[in-house]
Image (spheres, grey):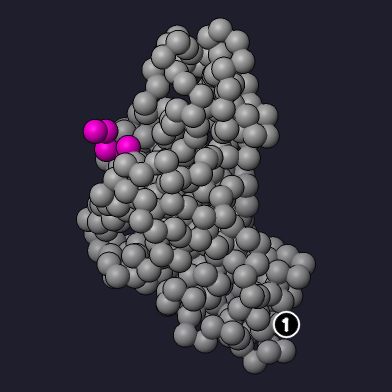
Amino acid sequence: MNWYTVTNEDELDSPSLLIYKENLISNLDNMIDSALHVNLLIPHVKTNKMEEVILLMRERGINKVKTATIAEAELAAIAGMKFVVLAHQPVGPKIQRFITLCKTYRNTEFVVIVDDKRIIEKISDEAAANDLIISVFLDINNGMNRSGLRLDDQALLFYQSLYRTPSLACKGLHVYDGHLRQPDVDERKDSILNSYKAVENLISDIECSGLPTPIVIAGGSPAFSVHNQFADRLVSPGTTVLWDWGYAEKCKEQSYDFAALVFTRVISKPAKGIVTVDLGHKAIASENPIHNRVRFLNLENYTLKSQSEEHGVLEVVNWNEIQVGDCFYGIPYHVCPTVNLYEKAFVIEDQKWNETWSVKARNRSLTV
């Protein structure tokens, strides 16, 4: 029997998200072993969005996480995390929501990243009005051009100004280099280390100016195998917990197990050589080209020809052997947005579905 086969698959509805608990735990242990120390880990929970996964992290000594939404940050606090970074500069009502989060969960230190003076002033004003000191990290644009402050001759002045801002506690730098994901590990390592030199220069300038050495949160999953060799920075892998087809191809030096699969059934055989499964856009991340969305483990010689909301149309060679109702197990190319499509996950242990976890933080808000 293949490792992914579920013995009571007849009880599983489709399409569905399957979490393989043994592989998940193995990945967590592997991630911890790959770091210089568990205290240097700050995994990103945007990949899993499940309280049970965060609790498994806590059981293994991880007490810091990074999040993308206030809902994820709240879920991390509910699960008992002590240090939670909102790695998404809040704007509009999110500023007040973040303040409410800090007031509601007093046992958790919430940190927010910033790069804009107007937003910094608004957070400072709201913090003062609520008698709070808000921890902040300066978000650095390390070449990805998605967010953050450019590392130019004004960066030190910006950091010094942030450090002096009332009601804020400037803790350090947030440096995400997710654009550096070359399949060649040596090329990727060189690019990551070279791009980080400007960050090191800024750190040196900060120290020479008389300010404390900043804490640095660096990288994501593609850069994990590089940044995890240094004790002067926190590292924030996320996909490593569940792993996916995309990073398995790009990051071959990282040996993690597939802990999340999509489960689908054949619902029609509309023409010779064609079968349709119930795996449409609503069941698998579809931001990539159609040939990079899912890889089925128990089907060979097929092509995903098209998808609509609820249908996936496959061109297959063994059409005569496939029956309506047959089950396929697929590895997502991009697991993070795939998980976000599901309200719950069927948890597989000893090749059997025996519990269900809620994907709670797929919602934009919980209580805050």
Q: Indicate left or right for 131 with 24 as reference.
A: right
Looking at the rendered structure, the number of numbered marks drawn on it comes to 1
Name the residue rendered at 65%, 79% in the picture: 99
Image location of residue 167, percent across then percent down: 62, 85
Please check the rendered image and state whether residue 3 is part of the magenta-colored stretch, yes or no: yes
Name the residue rendered at 47%, 52% in the picture: 345
Image location of residue 286, percent across then percent down: 60, 34
Quadrant of the rendered image containing residue 274: top right
Q: Tell me the SS state at disc 1.
A: helix
Q: Indicate left or right for 79 with 102 as reference.
A: left
Q: Residues within 10 Å of mark 1 (few under 14, many from 20)?
A: some
Image location of residue 332, percent across then percent down: 47, 36
Q: Main secondary structure of the magenta part?
A: loop
Name the residue rendered at 56%, 62% in the picture: 361
The magenta stretch spans which residues?
A: 1-5
Is residue 325 shown above or below 282? above
Is residue 284 shown above or below 177? above
Quadrant of the rendered image containing residue 185: top left
* Front residue of 284 and 191: 284
Quarter of the N terminus within the rendering: top left
Name the residue rendered at 37%, 26% in the picture: 298
* Front residue of 288 and 190: 288
Is residue 293 shown above or below 8? above
Residue 161 shows in the view: no
Q: Which residue is mark 1?
A: 125
Quadrant of the rendered image containing residue 295: top left
Is residue 205 shown above or below 275? below
Image location of residue 316, percent across then percent down: 48, 13
Looking at this view, name the residue that lies furthest to the bottom. Answer: 131
